[in-house]
């Protein structure tokens, strides 16, 4: 296991390429492998596909411009790190964001796919559904996955539109997503003292859902937050992968997850720009695992999940 000192050194090296939490010192990053971070050519070899990109928390703002502006700024700042693709989670007017934005999205559906049209080779979209509205969510799956450009679904953990993923309302949605070859990302979190909101999902509840659908793969976002408990909760379910972003950096997380699940069941997420990029990259790149394991985690596993729907849509 990597020492705390070594983890701090590599995290600091990555963080020197950010300012104010995210701004990249591009010229330094391109020629500073001796600072403890990977060179540009080494990063390119990883073929990074980011499964958890959160510009503007995917909310377009009152006229759609806020999301576009934050995506553009984020992509510029990410250039030195050679991310090939990034997946964000658009709202589609199902009550998953504030009322005014939902109404605007329903009146302006072209705005939902505007980022994908503007950056077709960089972005992937996984829509947010509302399991309280099963009929509306099924219609959205047909519109945006079957007939539209989206590649999967993100089930939020804290919005008013959420339900625990073990709730029966989620089952018809999961079935339809699988029929369409979509990827399923479920927000999960263990909180000391129990859930503050009953609508949140834990890795235990995701394990219950995955047990009902052993033929369908699920992504456990944030590995449950309290990752030692989260990894153990999903360990016995080979159809659940752990995503790496969103909690405090702790040495040993990726090593334990690879040991308990296997590297083929771990996928990288940056949570950029709302989390420290240096932190999220160093979780994987500073881990004491093989280069091949890092390659799987940083992109190959996510590409495997996406391959059926990308092929069906003619995107590969």
Image (spheres, rainbow, N blue to C red):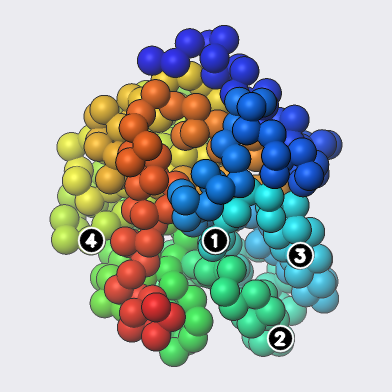
Residue at (70, 44) in percent of width and height: 30
**Mark 2 → mark 3, Cα distance in angstroms:** 21 Å
- Tell me the quadrant of the picture where the N terminus can be found: top left
Relative side of 293 to 107, left or right: left
SS of the residue at dot 3? helix
**Mark 4 → mark 1, Cα distance in angstroms:** 26 Å
Q: Earlier in the sequence, mark 4 or mark 2?
A: 2
The residue where tag 3 is placed is 72
Which circle marks residue 216 in the picture? Answer: 4
Query: CB under 8 Å between callouts 3 and 1?
Result: no
- Image location of residue 49, percent across then percent down: 49, 56
The residue where tag 2 is placed is 108
Q: Earlier in the sequence, mark 2 or mark 3?
A: 3
Label 4 or label 1, whichever lies nearer to me, is: 1
How many numbered marks does the figure carry?
4
Label 2 or label 3, whichever lies nearer to me, is: 3
Sort mark 2 into few (<14), some (14-19) or many (20+) by Cα contacts within 10 Å: some
Sort mark 4 into few (<14), some (14-19) or many (20+) by Cα contacts within 10 Å: many
- Image location of residue 309, percent across then percent down: 35, 76
The residue where tag 1 is placed is 84
Label 2 or label 1, whichever lies nearer to me, is: 1
SS of the residue at dot 4? loop
Query: CB under 8 Å between callouts 2 and 1?
Result: no
Label 4 or label 2, whichever lies nearer to me, is: 4
């Amino acid at each position: 296991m990597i020492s705390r000192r070594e983890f701090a050194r590599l995290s600091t090296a990555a963080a020197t390429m950010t300012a104010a939490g995210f701004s990249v010192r591009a010229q330094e990053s391109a020629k500073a492998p001796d600072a403890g971070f990977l060179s540009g050519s080494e990063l390119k070899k990883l073929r990074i596909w980011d499964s958890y990109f959160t510009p503007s928390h995917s909310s377009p703002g009152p006229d759609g411009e806020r999301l576009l502006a934050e995506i553009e700024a984020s992509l510029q700042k990410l250039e030195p790190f050679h991310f090939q693709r990034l997946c964000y989670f658009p709202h589609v007017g199902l009550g998953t964001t504030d009322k005014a934005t939902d109404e605007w999205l329903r009146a302006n559906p072209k705005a939902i796919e505007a980022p994908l049209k503007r950056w077709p080779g960089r972005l992937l979209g996984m829509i947010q559904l509302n399991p309280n509205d099963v009929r509306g969510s099924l219609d959205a799956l047909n519109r945006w996955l079957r007939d539209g450009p989206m590649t999967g679904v993100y089930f939020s953990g804290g919005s008013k539109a959420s339900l625990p993923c073990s709730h029966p309302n989620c089952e018809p949605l999961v079935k339809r997503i699988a029929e369409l070859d979509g990827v399923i990302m479920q927000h999960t979190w263990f909180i000391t003292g129990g859930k503050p909101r009953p609508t949140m999902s834990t890795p235990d509840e995701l394990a219950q859902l995955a047990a009902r659908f052993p033929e369908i793969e699920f992504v456990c976002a944030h590995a449950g937050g309290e990752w030692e408990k989260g990894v153990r909760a999903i360990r016995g379910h080979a159809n659940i992968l752990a995503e790496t972003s969103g909690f405090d950096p702790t040495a040993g997380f990726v090593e334990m997850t690879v040991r308990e699940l296997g590297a083929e069941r771990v996928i990288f997420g940056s949570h950029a720009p709302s989390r420290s990029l240096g932190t999220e990259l160093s979780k994987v790149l500073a881990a004491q695992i093989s280069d091949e394991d890092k390659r799987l985690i940083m992109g190959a596993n996510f590409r495997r999940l996406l391959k059926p729907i990308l092929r069906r849509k003619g995107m590969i």
